Image (spheres, rainbow, N blue to C red):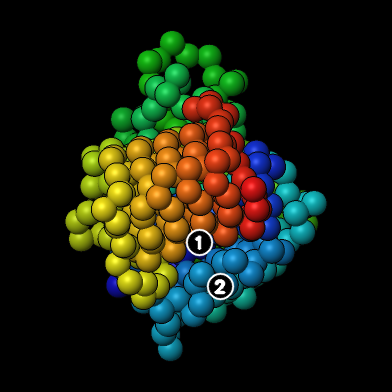
Amino acid sequence: MSNAIGIIFANSGSDNLQGLAQERPIAAVPFGGRYRILDFALSSMVNSGIRTIGLVTPHQYRPLLDHLGAGKDWFLERKDGGLFILPGVMHSLAGSKDAFCIKDLQNNLEYLQKDYVENVLISSGDQIFNINFRDTLEFHKDKHADVTLIYKAVRPRDDDSLDQILLEVDGDQKVSKIHNKYSLESEELTFLKFVNIIIIRRELLLEIIEKYGSYGCIGLMEILASNIEVLEILGSPTNSSIGTIHTIKDYFDRSMDLLDFKVREQLWSGVDRTHTKIVDNPPTKYTAQAKVSNSLIASGCSIAGEITNSIVFRGVVLEQGCRIQNSIILPKCHIHSNAQTNYTILDKSVIVHGENVLKGSESHPLVVLKKTVI
């Protein structure tokens, strides 16, 4: 068992998800047929031996609690440690670029004080990844680091996210600079992108909260950047696929990535599996008229139509003659005969009656809100 506790910031929202995050935080958005985005950070911590994990929640926390329960499906229903729900501060205090708001940590100081572990592993809850942190925790311990920042080498054209933080790391893995991509003047072909995962000494984190807690919603990364000369801040690379969900195109692209076997193998195969809420659905029923190619279909569905390059969640009904292409169909949707979707995302419990055609584009997928009847 790791000598660390975890904190996941699951309170990020976005107006760029076109309604998918309207009644739920990004962390609670369904993903990949049976998961929530939060499952990936939570499972990675559990697979790394961390058995005490705090979840910083927003005001619309009900979808998170419905999904997590007491944490049994993640082996966190425990007498010692387990899953802790940590209320976040008001959204009006948070800026879009404030990674890991100190006010959220100050608001839940008791969680950090009651456990005497050496380190705290902090992650955002809006990313898709599968990382075992055991080696990084050992690296952090062996190097006597104050802070270890996990990063990934990326090409600028492959990742143009506006709010990414970049690192400069020397030969000894010491971080010499922390800055924003667009203030960086460099001819390098690749950059070291901080992936919103931090390991920090618990005592240091408590000192930072005491010193900066009255500053408003200042981000932890901003504090670390301003103290880089006095802290031992190291960088640790990861080869894991990292997909951050900030926009509807992020969500669509990362979902479509799952149709690639190599991506699925990295996220879901092997010892470190991604855990999620168990739902005892019957197997999906396929009629003689069903045609399915290059798609992921969850359990509990009834398929009589044609599906191509799509992801279909649990409990979906697709009647004979309907045609689903390049689409994401969330749980309990019902698409009637001869209806069509292309580059479309249907939120939960949407009903599409026969003969309707819903069409977006690869760059601008069409989003249909929850419980809409068309």
Q: Position of residue 4 (x, y in %)?
A: 40, 67
Image point (41%, 84%), residue name:
78
Q: Nearer the viewer, residue 76 or 167?
A: 76
Residue 253 makes an appearance in the image: yes
87 lies left or right of 151? right
Q: For mark 2, give the secondary structure.
A: helix
Q: Which residue lies furthest to the left in this view?
A: 270
Crowd tier of the residue under label 2, counting other residues whose Cα lies within 10 Å: few below 14, some 14–19, many 20 or above: few
Q: Name the residue under label 2.
A: 66
Question: Which quadrant of the view contains residue 16?
Answer: top right
Query: Which one is closest to the eye, mark 1 or mark 2?
Result: 1
Residue type highlighted by circle 2 = Asp
Q: Which of 286 and 321 is in front in this view?
A: 321
Q: Which of 279 and 234 is in front in this view?
A: 279
Image point (57%, 37%), residue name:
358
Q: Position of residue 175 (x, y in %)?
A: 44, 35
Q: For mark 1, give the secondary structure.
A: loop
Image point (54%, 79%), residue name:
114
Q: Does residue 135 sit above or below 315 in this rendering?
A: above
Q: Mark 1 points at which residue?
A: 332
284 lies left or right of 188? left
Residue type highlighted by circle 1 = Lys
Q: Which of 133 and 212 is in front in this view?
A: 133
Q: Residue furthest top?
A: 187
Q: Which residue lies furthest to the bottom in this view?
A: 79
